[in-house]
Amino acid sequence: MTASDLMDASPAIPIGEDGPAFSAPWEAKVFAMTLSAYDAGLFTWKDWAQTLGAELAKDAPGAPCKPYYEHWLTAFEKLLAAKGLTSLADLGRLQDAWDKAARATPHGEPIALKS
């Protein structure tokens, strides 16, 4: 499946004049990682569609909606964990480590995670 096929199969993707519209670099990165993981055979498109659909359905009608790519990221993490490629606990620990490193890094310096 190409990026074009993905956009056709996922009508909720924010689209701009030139294709998918991203409001932050991380959104484009998680989009690309998802396509790469699919291309590598880590999950089927049916698995992806069901997982993303379940995340999108969590927004209650009339309530403020979570941004689209936050749903996308959550679905990607959950699918990787369901396939045994990582765990949600490991992802949580990595997120915490990243947050601590970012807060401890002076502005303009590269962020480095301690091993």
Image (tube, rainbow, N blue to C red):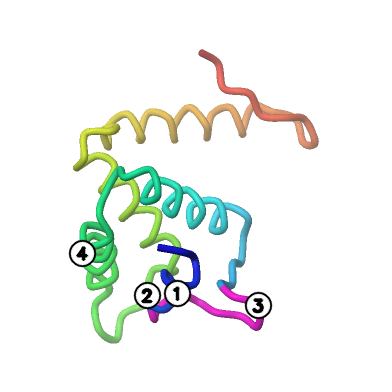
Image location of residue 104, percent across then percent down: 64, 27
Question: Would you name the residue on which mark 2 appears?
Answer: 10
Q: Nearer the viewer, residue 32 or 99?
A: 32
Q: Residues in magenta? A: 11-19
Q: Earlier in the sequence, mark 2 or mark 3?
A: 2
Amino acid type, mark 2:
Ser
Does the magenta run of residues contain 13?
yes
Q: How far is mark 2 from mark 3, CA to CA?
A: 16 Å
Contact? badges 2 and 3 (CB < 8 Å): no
Image location of residue 101, percent across then percent down: 58, 27
Q: Nearer the viewer, residue 1 or 11?
A: 1
Contact? badges 1 and 2 (CB < 8 Å): yes
Q: Main secondary structure of the magenta part?
A: loop
Question: Would you name the residue on which mark 1 appears?
Answer: 7
Q: How far is mark 4 from mark 2, CA to CA?
A: 11 Å
Q: Nearer the viewer, residue 99 or 26?
A: 26
Question: Would you name the residue on which mark 3 appears?
Answer: 18
Give above or below for 48 relative to 39.
below
Amino acid type, mark 1:
Met
User: At x 42% / y 52%, what residue is drawn?
Assistant: 34
Indicate the secondary structure of the residue bearing disc 2.
loop
Q: Earlier in the sequence, mark 4 or mark 1?
A: 1
